[in-house]
Image (cartoon, grey):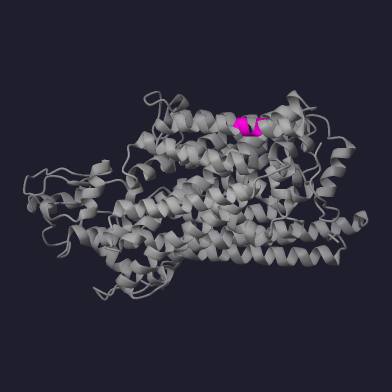
Amino acid sequence: MADSPSNNEYWSANMRLVAICLVIWAVVSFGFGILLRPMLSGIAVGGTDLGFWFAQQGSILVFLALIFFYAWRMNTLDKQHGVDEE
Amino acid sequence: MEQYTLNLIFVGATFALYIGIAIWARAGSTSEFYAAGRGVHPVTNGMATAADWMSAASFISMAGLIAFTGYDNSTYLMGWTGGYVLLAMLLAPYLRKFGKFTVPEFIGDRFYSPTARVVAVVCLIVASVTYVIGQMTGVGVAFSRFLEVDNATGLYIGAAIVFMYAVLGGMKGVTYTQVAQYCVLIVAYTIPAIFISLQLTGNPIPALGLFSDHVASGQPLLERLDQVVQELGFAEYTGHHSNTFDMFLFTMSLMIGTAGLPHVIIRFFTVPKVADARWSAGWALVFIALLYLTAPAVGAMARLNLIDTVYPNGTTEAPIAYDDRPEWMQNWEVTGLLSFQDANGDGLIQWYNAGSADFAATAEERGWAGSELTVNRDILVLANPEIANLPGWVIALVAAGGLAAALSTAAGLLLAISGAISHDLIKGQLNPNISEKAELLSARIAMAGAIAVATYLGLNPPGFAAQTVALAFGLAAASIFPALMMGIFSKRVNNKGAVAGMLAGLIVTVVYIFLHKGWFFIPGTNTFTDADPLLGPVKSTSFGAIGAVINFAVAYLVSNATDEPPQEIRDLVESIRVPRGAGAAQDH
């Protein structure tokens, strides 16, 4: 196992990444899909508005992208900090 | 060939496949029984997780709920997928690194307390049993419709089949049968959706068809739908009519509940590596998204088709006569889930929103005396291919898919329940020296017991399948998720804090649910209703998010008022935070 300072650096890098991803997660679903929908009502998408699209399609697509991005980024971080599984 | 025979062939063939796989993959050791020997590839695991996850509520019920309400029920779509982001980032890799078999085992070890483990078992059983009741109800309804037997008989047949493969196969049997079930359910869900999307919009991808032009009218599909529903006095389909705060809380409850449901979490114990646990969550969501991106299109298109069926000449013209109604309506009338009441005695089927004050004048002018058609929302997906006049084999396929969804989830939940009882309660607490063989036997007995209880309660369910399932999410959100998260992300939360937090979250949520749904779900014992809840707009299904906040707050306050966890526990938390050194599962 790597030494403690490196682990702390690893852990704070992980926390930063999680924080960024969860902000995006909240903005597309609770934000664009629910609370901010009135602000997006001017942008038309196929017979309705962008908020409706985010609530029924967009947020799910963003969730997918977030998980794969996180998995890829964390597996890289594991290697950089020497804490990956051999 | 008759529809009944076709249904029997499709349902029978898929069941033979599941049982065949269960027998072929029969588990030998305890490690295999719970976690398939950790040899499951992330993509395979993702597919099995998707089948485990998507229950009768997702397959049979969700599109119907969206169809009849529109935008407001987008909560189910966001809530039941957004939880995977939390799982992938906050729980799955760490629990895999911890390397034990069950959720209570983690809670017991991390909070160095047998009491915490027992409390976790209680939380798990309360949430899972509530969930299984919903599934068994769905199994009963689907079986009785397609095999043309009564509800109780359908339920007994379903229970017998769940018992056979879950008890014989354990996790490994379940993993591979669930891969087969995923394939059946996703094909069954998308094929009719593609046909209908082509009919209505010419676009073969339903998710794109939803935002395309409606061929018959030339208008965008959603604009057309908004127009026809409003011509009948219903609320605008794409509009926001529910309380925003409750919508927010409900979505949050479903998301946290997803990440706190033990039968989903144990899936991530079965992958070979920590890195794979992260990928697994992504793959699970890929397979789930295939259905969830299609569901809103299924809902909108079914609503439009249903209106066109009743008003073939347009919503401003006269509806069809009851004597000319299509065969599918007659079929569903037999089940009592669709009914016609000729209020004004003209023999025509007037279907509109009789509760709308704005529409009352129009209705009176046309001589309408109330809406005459009652359609249960849960039949929409199953009836969808019939409404769209699709061939008989598609209808039979949907029957097989609906049953696959309900049975796979029931089996996964039963496995989590039996694991908690045999592994955490009996081996962990009551009799630590129990032999591997006896532990396996007690797991199977626990499973049989859980099926018996769920079948009994499924005969007299507390509500619709989807309502019961939403309550289970609230319970998991309020009890299990906060304990797991604090166990990983805080070194300060101790045994007393965790136990107090879980109990506070669980009890407050259970009481709130019972106040609105009746004590122990007995009808008539409720003080409030979800139409007029105790706390302003907060419905009992949305309360899980508040229960989770209470859990976090109580655990934090109690921990800070009591001793710090010992050094070895802080070391344990350090070690689960890094992937290096994750081996195979260690038994106690």
Residue A85: image quadrant is: bottom right
Residue B233 image offset from top left, x and y in percent: 22, 54
In the displayed structure, A3 sits above or below B585; it is below
Give me the residue at 64% from left, 29% from top: B503
Residue B110 image offset from top left, x and y in percent: 78, 38
Residue B162 image offset from top left, x and y in percent: 52, 41
In the displayed structure, B151 sits above or below B204; it is above
Q: Is residue B346 left or right of residue B39?
A: left
Query: Does the segment drawn in magenta span residue B444?
Result: yes
Query: Does the segment drawn in magenta span residue B283?
Result: no
Q: Nearer the viewer, residue B208 or B482?
A: B208
Give me the residue at 20% from left, 56% from top: B232
Q: Is residue B7 left or right of residue A74?
A: left
Residue B527 at least partly seen: yes
Q: Is residue B108 left or right of residue B149?
A: right
The quadrant of the rendering that contains the C terminus of chain B is: top right
Q: Nearer the viewer, residue B297 or A77?
A: B297
Give me the residue at 6% from left, 49% from top: B346
Residue B577 image offset from top left, x and y in percent: 80, 51
The quadrant of the rendering that contains the N terminus of chain B is: bottom left
Q: Which residues are magenta?
A: B442-446
Our reading of the magenta stretch's main secondary structure is helix
Give me the residue at 47% from left, 26% from top: B520
